Amino acid sequence: MKKPEAYTVSIGVLAVVDTWLTGTIFPVPVWVTFIAWASFFVLGGGRAGFVKSVASNLTGLVIASLTLLCIATTSGGAIAVAVLVGIGSAAMVQASKIKLLDVLPAIVWGFASTVGTMVATGKAITTAGIGNPALIAAAALVTGAVFGFVSEVVGEALQFRREHRLG
């Protein structure tokens, strides 16, 4: 099977598994797993892409969580929220100066996934326990990276390679 078809089968089948899994026994936002899955490929795939993707996405999650915690301590005025988001955004840019985190969009995807998970769950960042949106987003981000890695391994295994023999 050629590479595009192999990856079509691999990603298509695993997308079914991911969607079923997150819709039934592991209730994390499927859209966050897909973001992290894409991040894995954008960051080059393989073990290095996995590590870099998880590190970048979780860095964005930490910065978002700190930003949201600061917002929770303010009166919630639009100016205060905007300034705190600006500080969080600046922190993401500074974090991207670290070699492991040097693809800024991957940090932003972790930040956005955390904020989006908080909004989608309707739970504050200060929620205690496993219902905390940062914990939910973290689980989804790591799960997405795992799906990326597995889809790459399966896609590579499904490829048909012709051997050229001399003589």
Image: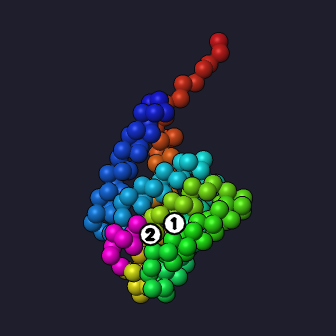
Identified at 28% across, 63% down, the residue is 23
Residue annotated with mark 1: 111
Give the quarter of the image for residue 31. bottom left
Check disc 2 and report its element: helix, strand or loop: helix
Identified at 39% across, 69% down, the residue is 117
Residue 29 drawn at (x, y percent): 36, 64
Give the quarter of the image for residue 137. bottom left
Residue annotated with mark 2: 115
Distance of mark 2 from mark 1, alpha carbons? 6 Å
Quadrant of the image for the C terminus? top right
Type of amino acid at the residue the image marks with label 1: Phe
Q: Which mark is residue 36?
A: none
Residue 55 drawn at (x, y percent): 60, 64
Type of amino acid at the residue the image marks with label 2: Val
| Label 2 with label 1: CB-CB less than 8 Å | yes
Front residue (pair 82, 29): 82
- Bounds of the magenta span? 116-123
Give the quarter of the image for residue 83. bottom right
Residue 161 drawn at (x, y percent): 53, 29
Asked if 24 appears above or below 157 in the picture, the reply is below
Front residue (pair 147, 102): 102
State the predominant SS element of the stretch in magenta: helix
Let me know if residue 64 is in the magenta part.
Answer: no
